[in-house]
Every structure is written in C-alpha cells, then in structure tokens.
Image (cartoon, grey):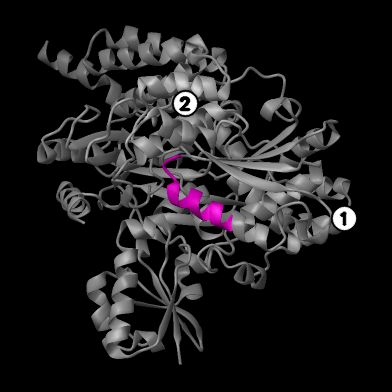
Amino acid sequence: MTTTIYVPKDSAARSIGADLVAMAIEAESAKRGISVSIVRNGSRGALWLEPLVEVVTSEGRVAYGPVSPADVDSLFDEGFHLGGDHPLALGKTDDIPWLARQDRVTFARVGIVDPLSIGDFQEHGGLVGLRRAIAIEQEEIVTEVTQSGLRGRGGAGFPAGIKWRTVMATESDRKYICCNADEGDSGTFADRMLMEGDPFTLLEGMTIAAIAVGATEGVIYVRSEYLTAFETLNRAIEVAREFGWLGKDVLGSGIEFDVRTRIGGGSYVCGEETAMLESIEGKRGVVRSKPPLPAINGLFGKPTVINNVLTLATVPAVLADGAATYQGRGVGRSVGTQVFQLAGNIARGGIVETAFGISLDTLVNDFGAGTLSGRAVRAVQIGGPLGAYLPVASMGISMDYESLLAAGGMLGHGGVVVFDESVDLAQQAKFAMEFCAIESCGKCTPCRVGSVRGAETIEKIISGQDVEGNKKLLLDLCEVMTDGSLCAMGGLTPLPVRSAMLHFSEDFDRRARSDDSIN
Amino acid sequence: MTYSPWSVDAASAVLATTCDKPGPILISLQALQDEFGFVRDEDVELVARACNVSRADVHGVLTYYHDLRMSAPATTTLRICVAEACQAVGSRDLVEEVEKSFNARMDQPGDDVELKSVYCLGNCALGPSAMVNGELVGRASAQGLKNAANARVNS
C-alpha cells in the first residue's frame, strides 16, 4: 500500500529545509522498500512547526514537526509512515491546538490541498461559489458581497461590494479586475502563502468579481520577491484554462474572462493601487491623483476593480456559504475573519485566521507564546511599516479596524511584528522615515522631502541636539506629511513615528538625559 | 546564473515578444534583464523604437525600479532583509557579520559577491531572512549564508 506524505512546498517551509526533508523521505523510503507518494502542499500556517510533515493514516492526517533531514531515519524507524509515535509527533494535524482554535475561511484550503490539483480543489469546496455566481444575476452577486460586510484586506478596509457596484454601474467597452499581490509590508506573508498554497481560490474570486461587474480581463500584479508565488499562479492559470474555467467560455456559461500576471519591479509604493496601475501599464510607479477613482477610470483608463489577494480569495466563501454566514463573525463594522500574521521576534509565528475582535494579547502571548528570544515583549508594530508601534500596556486592544484606528494605529494587512526589550524605538522611527525616503515615488513634496528631513531630525534627536526643539519640529513635520501627502506612503509614515514618540518617549530622551547628568 | 551574450539582433528578438503587449516598457526591460543580465545603454533606444515611445520614457522606467540594473550582476547575489520583522530578530547584527564574512559592503557593486538590502521577502515569522541567488533562506546566520553561497557556486 502506498502511503501519502505531505511535505510543504511553501517558500517559508523551503527556507528552512523542506526540500531536503522531502528528498530524504524519498531516499529513505526507497532504501527501505516502503512505497510513499509525496505531495508538496502549501503550509498549514504554523510556521514555527515547519518543516511540518503530514502522513495520511486511517485516522486522518497526522503531523510531525519541525522535521530536519537528520530526523527522517529515526522517523522511519518508528514507523511514522504508519502514524507511529516519535518525539516529533504532534498527533492529528487538525487537533493541534494552535490550528484547532482558528476559524479558517480565506485560508480554509491552504496547506490541505495540492495547490495545483483542480480535483483536490473541488473536493474541498472549490468552484461552488463561482457556480452560484454564474447562476444568479450580477446584481445579486454584488448585493451578496455588500451584505457580507467584506472589506478590503489590503489595508484601507473599504467595503468591497461598494467598489464593485461602482464598476458594475459604469458603462464601458472593457473592464478589468486587478489583484494587488504587491505584498510589500514587512511582517505580512498571507498573500504569498495563499498564492502558493491555494491559487485557485484567488482565481475563483477574480472570476466571480469579473462576472459581477462585467469584466473580461484580470491582471494579478505580483511583487518580484515572490517568484515562487508568481510561477505557481502562472501554472494554476494554465490548468484553469485547460479545465475550461478561464477563457472564452467560463465553465460553459458563455461568459469570457481570462487572467494574466505581471511581475513588479521592486518598488514598495507600487502596492498603492494607482501606482500599481501605472506599473501594470509599464510606466514609472508614480501615484495618481484621485479622483478619478480607479473604479471609474482605472487600468488603461477603463473601469477597474482593484482588490487585495485576501479580499478576492474570501469572495468564493461568501458566495458559497452566503453573506449571513460570513457576517456572523467579527465585531461592529469589522465583520468576518482576518488573516493575522504573527511575525518578528515571536516564538510561534505564522498565520492565525480568526474572527475580528481577538485581543492583541491573545495573538502575541497565547498563539505566539511570547518572543523567540525569551526576553520580554516591549513593542508590537501592527499593519506593516506604516503602522503604529504599540506598547505592552495596549495589549488588551481588540484587533479590528475601528479599535486600532481609535488607538492611533491601523490594522493594515494584518501583520503583527513583535519586538523584545532590546528594541530602540527612536531607531525604528528613524527607519520609518528612511524607508519612506527610499520608496517614495517622488510625486508629492511632503513625502519626498519630508521623509528625508524627518530622518535627519530624528538623527539629531538621537544624538542629543536640541532634543525638545527637534521633537516639536518632528511633530510639525508629521502633521504636514499626514495632511499633505498624496497617498498612504507619506500620509501614514508619521504613524510609526508619532506612536513611537508617544509610547516610548524615553527612547527619544536618552541622549538629552545623559547630557543632563554630565552637567 | 548564466546569461545570453548581448547583440542588437538578440535584444531585438527579445523585444519582439514583448513590445506588442499592453504597457510594454517595463516588461520589455525586465525581459532584456532576464535574458542578458542587465540593461545596456544601447537597449534604451531599442526599447524606445520597438515600443514606439520616447527614450525619455524608457529612461524614466529604467531608473525608477530598484530591480532594474545597468551593470552586470556579481557571481553571487545575496539579498538580506533589513525591514522591521527581520530587524526584530537581529538583521542589523546579521548585516554587520555578513559584511565581515564576505568582505563586502551592503549595496555596493562587486564582481564576486554583491550584498543587497531588501525590504521584506515575505518570510517574516522565520527571520532573519535572506536570498542567495534567488533561494530563500530563513533563520539566516552569517555562516549559514556563507555555506549556502558556496554550495550555490559549486553546484
């Protein structure tokens, strides 16, 4: 009998040796005359357990991890291919508490299916949402998505249904669906994991969006650091075309829709939707002024739906299970689930998908088990490089759009980056300005010049020059950048800076204090 | 990594596959770089002609994107993530150690090895992260990267 063994092909798992583990299992099984079939799946998201090897048994899938190539010999000795016990045994994968306590909707199939098997995809509920979308009216699809309360997961949190309605209502000979897969925020990797682990779900969401608004072309803009995701998507698109899903006649409906991919050029600001459009058009990734909205005047001047990977990948579940099911989760206006990404100095990092409203403390200390270094947590940056640094005193905060906004931060794309007590928040604030200076598209002055002046001013504060005067100047500069920048790059860079100054003022006063003590 | 020898004809053949696509400038430059290792001065004019745009347009795109380069890449390219999530697990120290062990400076040109800053590789739970000739390395150490670089050169 052939045993099926899953070894993730996810980039994160491969970065710590999953390929070597797969090779070792293949070699060792051949040596022992044991018949195994290795499936390279996506990651379950428990990155702290990677490489996580799963064996299919009569009881279901059982897990072992983290497995190194050196463990493979002893795993076979203990009969792990039959589900045997071993120091690395974790029991049934679905019963691992870290996974069992999550509420997977967007990530329901990631790590479970073979990413490029359309049969596997359908066995696990794939295409149900799309088939329903084909069967109902465009108006009904948009209403369903609006009623579900699904908001843009890229960071802005704009209701997806309202955006779709604008595109649907705009007359044009051509409309586009653009998927923003330029996941540049440090501390985020959910888009990548979904594209590598379950690319068909993204294609399904895009196809549903296309049917809803009457678009015929889709473009996925993938950042150049994500070459594996890019290649996986391209293969998935080919499989979908052969299947009769993408192309002139979507699943026999007579509707035309096809998807192509574009690779970015290593520019962070191209994650801003209008800069992304410019980049897809082959131009410099410079931000456009709004209005006109991309929904009316988007890619090549045509009405365009622009949604993040996670937004589009959630749409199939909304259509399959209905708006009410999705809307039943979450708190206030933050409904549904959020794919949180635990990152940085964290013992148990990875994907935690759960309803909005979970506390930061539960994420960091419960799921995350504190820092990797074992030292105390000092700061958590939420929402990427443009998100606020929160102190330990804020750990009780509810993780939803509104609560974070009220706390002077933002949820962004759901990244949670943990720092231990060795962090210097003045240095982090300076980095925020430096990063903005490097990545600014240069179109508006507050961002282009403000970021350079900001970094200089923080350097003066760090080195103890007129600390009080320069702190005032910095706050003034932050106000100009917030109010005067064209897009979120310059407009939100003050968020990490101001939050660092507010919650960690001692880091900005260090030099001033030491000078005082000398005097 | 091996690249094709550049010639006007070879470059034109590459451009024939890209210039008729919508929004062709960036993909044309990317295709040239993929094929020949970097974008040459002469390419600017070729792209402008093939895509029916001005040389200024091409120059603008070429100098905007961090990925596009105008000089030959080193034998080994090492990209180290210097963004927040990796800073939280010691990427600043890692950069110093790597500079010492490779005897090279970050973001300076080099023939044998080129060390480049990158802002996020999407491996933020297993940092510090780096990329050795396109291969992602998690929980990176200076020694580990040295070994990975040697393995990739020898293979």
Q: Nearer the viewer, residue A127 or A449?
A: A127
Q: Nearer the viewer, residue A506 or B123?
A: B123
Mark 1 to mark 2: distance in Å?
A: 43 Å
| Residue A455 found in image quarter | top left
Q: Position of residue B33 (x, y in %)?
A: 39, 34
Q: Is residue A395 magenta?
A: no
Q: Position of residue A513 (x, y in %)?
A: 20, 18
Q: Main secondary structure of the magenta part?
A: helix
* Residue stretch rendered in magenta on the structure: A224-236
| Residue A172 found in image quarter | top right
Q: Is residue A496 above or below residue B95?
A: above
Q: Disc 2 marks which residue?
A: A495
Q: Nearer the viewer, residue A424 or A513?
A: A424
Q: Disc 1 marks which residue?
A: A136
Q: Secondary structure at mark 1?
A: loop
Front: mark 1 or 2 = 1
- Which chain is disc 2 placed on? A
Q: Position of residue A188 (x, y in %)?
A: 46, 44
